[in-house]
Image (cartoon, grey):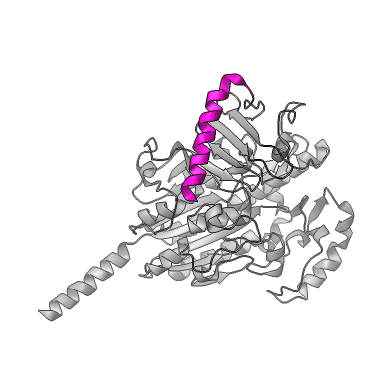
Amino acid sequence: MRLLLFLFSLTSTAIAHAAKPNVLFVISDDLNTALSGLGHPECKTPYLDRFAETGVTFTRAFCQFPLCGPSRASIMSGQYPIVNGVTGNGGHLNPQRMTLPRYFGSRGYWNARVSKIFHMGIPIDIVQGTPGRDHAPSWAEAHNIRALETLTPGKVANFTEPEVVAEYPRLREQWHAVKPGDKNYSMPRSVRGDFAVVEVADRDASLLPDTLAADKAIGLLRQRAGQKQPFFLAVGFVRPHFPFISTESSLRPYDPETTALPKFPSDDQADMPAQAIAKDMNLADDAVRQLRRGYYGAVSFMDEKFGRLMAELDRLKLRDNTIVVFVSDHGYLLGEHRMWKKTRLWEEAIRTPLIISAPGRARGVRCNRVVELVDLYPTLAELAGLPPEPGTQGQSLVPLLENPKAKLARNDAWIYTGRGHGLRTERWAFMWYPAKRNRQEAFMLYDMKSDPGQFTNLASNPKYAGVKTRLHSRLRERIASVK
C-alpha cells in the first residue's frame, strides 16, 4: 500500500511539473508604438504582426515611469516606482524583493536572462559586457552581451557631434584589446551615439547585440527543449534604443528623402507648463528625417531577431506550452512637440506595445482597455497557475485574454516621472505637476478622442473644469492607495 501511495505521489508530481507552461518574456528598449500592426504608416514589423495573430494585442498599455530603470524595476517587481524606490536609472531594486523571475524560480522553474532585462546603460554596458543594474538574485543564469555598438564598422552619421566620427577606428582597436566585463573601460561620452545612425553591412549583422542576444536565447531554448522542468526565459533586445544601429536591409525600406516629419502647430508649446517641455535639439528637417529613419530601421532589425526567436520556439515544438510576452519598457519621442527621447508624460513616451500569447487564450484580437505594465507580474503568475505573490500591486489581465471587452476593477493608468504624475483613461490624458521649489502647480488635460496628438491643453478651459477635478481626484486617490 505504501509503495502504491509513493508511486502515485511521484506520478502526480511529474504530471503537475509537466503541465506547467513555459514563459518566454521578450522586452524591447525604447520602442514606442511604431509597429505596422498597430497602424504605424511607415515602420514595418512583419514578425511582430504575425506574432500578434497568436495572442492579444493591448492597444492602450502604459508604462509606470517613462525611463528604462524605473520602468523595468516596476515590471519585474510588480510594484509602482514610488513603492519599490527605483525612480531613476541609478537605482537598485531591493535584493530581497521577490521579483517576477525569482518568483517563478521559487516555484520550480529554471530561469535565466539574456541581455538587458533590468536596467543597463546603453550603449556603455553593452560595450563593456557588464550587467548594469541587474538584480542578481532573480536568475539561475544571467548572460550579458558585449558588442561594439556605435563603433561597429559601417556608415555612420552623428547629427550632434559629427567631428567625433574620425575617432571611431582608433577607439575600435582599443575595444578589441579590452577583456569582456572590464568596468574600467569606457568609451568617451561624445561617441556613445545619442544621435547617431549606424548602417551596418548585412554580412556584419552578427556583430550587433540583438543578433548575439537572439543567438544566445536560441541556444538556451535548445538546451531546455525536452526538459521536464519548465523555464522562464527573459530576453532583452536593446534596439531601438540609441544609437540607432541596423543593417542595410533593415534600413532599405525607409527613404531618407520621404520619411515623414512629425506634425504639430507652430505654437504647440504655448499652452504647456515648463515641466512638460524637454530640451529642443534644434535639428534641421533633414537630420530629423534621418534620425526617424534610423529609428525605424532599428525597429525592423529588432523585429527580425524576434522572428528568429519565435521560429525556433516553433521548430522545437515548444510553442503549444509556452506563454510568450512581447513588451517595451516605455515609448519614445521622435521630434513630436519638438521633443526627443522619454521622461515626459506625452503619449509617445508612455504608451508601449504589449502582446501576450498564451495557450488556450484568445488569438488575433485587440484589447482597447487601459492596462499598466505593472499588471504583467500577476498576469503571468495566474496564467502559470501560481498563487498571487504578496506585495504585487498590479491586476491580472487574464480576464482580458479570455474576453478583450471584459471590465476589470481598474481601467486607468498612473504614470510618474519625478516631475509630475499622469493619469490615462480611455478618453482622457491628464497630467499634474505639483508645486516644487520655484515651479508653480500646473495641469494638462487632453481629449484623446478629438485630439490624439495632444495639441490643445484643456486644463484652463472652464468647460472642462468638472473633468479636470474628477481626474485630479482620481489621480490623488491612486497615489494615496500605494503609500
Q: Main secondary structure of the magenta part?
A: helix
Seen as rendered, the residue at the extreme top is: 463
Q: Residue at x 82, y 38 (%)?
A: 286
x and y, in percent, of residue 380 in the image: 41, 54
- Any part of residue 253 in sight: no
323 on left or right of 238: left
121 on left or right of 62: right
Seen as rendered, the residue at the extreme bottom is: 3
Above or below, comparing residue 54 to residue 313 in the picture: above
Q: Is 105 in the magenta?
A: no
Q: Residue at x 64, y 66 (%)?
A: 132
- Looking at the image, which is closer to me, 104 or 355? 104
- Looking at the image, which is closer to me, 455 or 480? 480
Above or below, comparing residue 219 to residue 257 in the picture: below
Quadrant where the image shows the N terminus:
bottom left
360 on left or right of 470: left
x and y, in percent, of residue 244 in the image: 72, 51
- Any part of residue 183 in sight: yes
x and y, in percent, of residue 471 in the image: 52, 32
Residue 442 found in image quarter: top right
Range drawn in magenta: 460-483
Residue 190 found in image quarter: bottom right
Above or below, comparing residue 87 to residue 254 in the picture: below
Seen as rendered, the residue at the extreme left is: 1
Residue 150 found in image quarter: bottom right
x and y, in percent, of residue 143 in the image: 57, 69
